Amino acid sequence: MKKTKKKRWTKKKVSINIKDIIGIIYILICVGLLAYCFIATPILLSVLKKHGTKTEAVITSTTIGGPRYTTPNYIYEFYVGDKTYEGNSLVDERDSSKIGTKIQILYLDWLPWFNRPIYYWDD
């Protein structure tokens, strides 16, 4: 009768280098951005439309966007407490007559940087 040796399993040390860590962080950032764009934004827009706080904002001469992919638009400013927040007014940069115009916007009390003009939902 032969004696068989039992194999002992030892844990191998896993070496993680800095490139692996950077790759993991990069993937997590990409997944987070995709989740925000395709999941969080539609949900927040729905919540904003139903439960947003209405206030007035003023269209400023500052523009947002660039000539390559989007038409530059003026931004609007509004105040919550002592802080100033901005948003895209959706008013084309070529329409300078709108500067200084007051518009109605909706913002979330707990997330005021997420805001839209009321006419955002107009067809």
Image (tube, grey):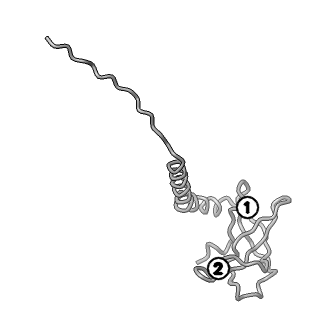
* Residue 108 in picture, x, y percent from top left: 70, 59
Vertical comparison of 108 with 96: above or below? above
Query: Which of the 4 image quadrants contains residue 100?
Result: bottom right
Amino acid residing under circle 2: Gly
Residue with the most extreme left position: 1
* Residue bearing mark 1: 53
Q: Which of the marked residues, 2 or 1, is nearer the chain's N terminus?
A: 1
Secondary structure beneath dot 1 equals: strand
Secondary structure beneath dot 2 equals: loop
Residue with the most extreme right position: 82
Please name the residue shown 73% across and 61% down the image: 53
* Residue 37 in picture, x, y percent from top left: 55, 62
Q: How many numbered badges does the structure rendering display? A: 2
Residue 66: assigned label: 2
Q: In front: 1, or 123?
A: 1
* Residue 55 in picture, x, y percent from top left: 77, 67
Please name the residue shown 70% across and 84% down the image: 93
Please name the residue shown 27% across and 19% down the image: 6
Please name the residue shown 68% across and 68% down the image: 116
